[in-house]
Amino acid sequence: MLRSLRLLLLTVLVSLSYPLLRCDAQKTAAQYDGGEPPLQVDVRLQGMSQPSLKPTPAASATPSSTPSPSPTPTPTPEPTPFSLYWVSDAQVYAYRYPKVYNKIFTYMANACEEQNAIGVLMTGDLVDNRTEQRHWDHAKAAIGLIRDKLPLWVVAGNHDVGADKGDYKTFLSYGFCAAEEGDLLYKDGVCWYDTFTAAGQDFLLLGIGWQNDSDYLSWARGVLETYPDHTAILLVHSFLTDKGNLTGTGKNLEKELLSHYPNLRLVLCGHNDGSARWQKEYEDGHGVNALMYNFQDDKKNGLGYIRILTFDPADRSLHVTTYSPWFDDYNYYKHETKDTFTLTEAW
């Protein structure tokens, strides 16, 4: 009986001490981890938000009854008009008026972006006396103002190489012309050609320098035959008289080149004084325009005039503007149509 009471008492004591032992064990563990645990762990867990178990509705697989409109195609941009600057017979600037020479090339360097000008053409007589070094120095200084801005394509005139001598040594030593190497040249630069693309059209520039023979003609024919789809522009010092007739060189070029190659559409020249135009339609239907200007002999009123040639692809017209940066003046002549005009279907 006494043994049974002892067992019962021992059982009661163990039952009462178990929760206390459990709390002491939890407290000891919490203290070991470095902090006091929350007293109501189960409450904290119940207070946390629970993520939704609802599935996200799937996108409908049924296509819309109204189809999306097709994107409107971007229209092909129209070719943009472009310009070429043309300077003829600048020898008086090299001789007496280097400031005018500089003013011309400064203007072109500054205005080229606004006018969408892509290059400069010179049709001879950059200097007045090829044996005077200061003339070449003035020409070089002026032309250097468009370096890295515009390419220059230039042919020699009689003052550059000597009317009877045809001495190209000094002229070629300056490397003014953008066409300056390899197959582009005839006799190291006496004649040359170059190509460019603008306003959606390929162009061929063909330069014929001052000389006293006609050996270059077979070379020029080969160039024109190689580029039949390029619109060709001929640069030559002498082609028209001041009355608008053909010079001896002009007659030879017209007979041997212009009449045979329908892609040759424009001739630019200087040499004689004033301004002149010439136009001819050939039996095969192609036409050629020739333009000449040279105002430098008027040493008071003719200073600094250049021509701005604007090619418009909308109607293949050529707009000609005559302007002097030195005077800030348009049109050398009183009759403006002689200096400002448009040639239709010119290229």
Image (cartoon, rainbow, N blue to C red):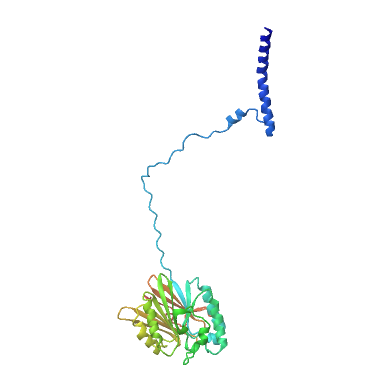
Q: Is residue 239 above or below residue 194?
A: below
Place of residue 53 in the rendered image (x, y in percent of width and height, measured from the top left): 49, 34
Task: Report if residue 173 is visible in the image.
Answer: yes
Q: Nearer the viewer, residue 163 or 23?
A: 23
Q: Is residue 93 above or below residue 315?
A: below
Q: Residue at x 69, y 29 (%)?
A: 28
Which corner quadrant holds the C terminus? bottom left
Place of residue 104 in the rendered image (x, y in percent of width and height, measured from the top left): 53, 79
Q: Nearer the viewer, residue 140 or 242?
A: 140
Place of residue 164 in the rendered image (x, y in percent of width and height, measured from the top left): 46, 92
Q: Residue furthest top?
A: 1
Q: Residue furthest front?
A: 3
Place of residue 242 in the rendered image (x, y in percent of width and height, measured from the top left): 42, 88
Q: Residue furthest bottom?
A: 164
Q: Residue at x 33, y 78 (%)?
A: 286
Task: Report if residue 298 is visible in the image.
Answer: no
Q: Residue at x 47, y 87 (%)?
A: 157
Q: Quadrant of residue 21?
A: top right
Q: Quadrant of residue 62?
A: top left
Q: Is residue 170 above or below residue 74?
A: below
